[in-house]
Amino acid sequence: MWSAITRFKASLTYAVILGILKLGERRCNRGKPSIPEIDAVLDLVGFGILGGLLFLSSVESYLLLLWMLNFAVLLYKRKNDMNIVLKAKMVK
């Protein structure tokens, strides 16, 4: 959807953001395998960064509304993953 609406600009930006986040996560974990819940949180963080970039670039208001709706769906979809990560952080 984002590829069609933004002519791949948002999709490419999101892919680069996720790549940078994943590289940072791998360096922090020192090469250990990642757990899916961390990947889900990185997905949310990356999409949040994309939203910030969309806001700063003064895109049309319908794109910001679409981003907000898409982010709400992602939050709902990833709520269990976020709970697992937050509980693990609280235990440490």
Image (cartoon, grey):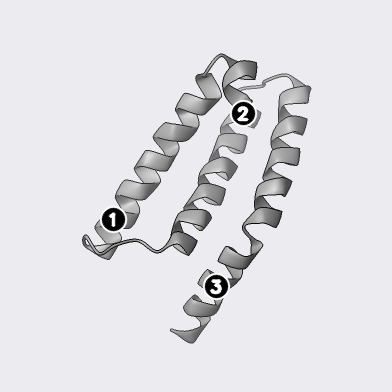
Q: In which quarter of the image is the N terminus?
A: top right
* Residue 29 as seen in the image, left or right of residue 84: left
Amino acid type at mark 2: Leu
Amino acid type at mark 3: Ile
CA gap, disc 2 and disc 1? 27 Å
* Residue 35 as seen in the image, left or right of residue 65: left
Judge by depth and name the residue closer to the eye, 89 or 75: 75
Secondary structure beneath label 1: helix
Q: Residue tagged by mark 3?
A: 84
Residue drawn 56% across and 35% down?
Answer: 50
Residue drawn 75% across and 39% down?
Answer: 69
Percent of width and height locating residue 48: 59, 44
Structural crowding at the residue carrying mark 1, measured as other residues with C-alpha within 10 Å and reported as few (<14), some (14–19) or many (≥20)? some
**Residue found farthest to the left:** 31
Task: Please name which of the two marks, 2 or 1, marks the residue nearer to the observer.
Answer: 1
Q: Residue tagged by mark 1?
A: 26
Percent of width and height locating residue 90: 52, 81
Q: Quadrant of the C terminus?
A: bottom left
Does residue 59 lie above or below 72 as drawn?
above
Structural crowding at the residue carrying mark 2, measured as other residues with C-alpha within 10 Å and reported as few (<14), some (14–19) or many (≥20)? some
Judge by depth and name the residue closer to the eye, 35 or 43: 35
Tell me the number on the disc at residue 54.
2
Percent of width and height locating residue 28: 29, 61
Q: Are marks 2 and 1 in contact (CB under 8 Å)?
A: no
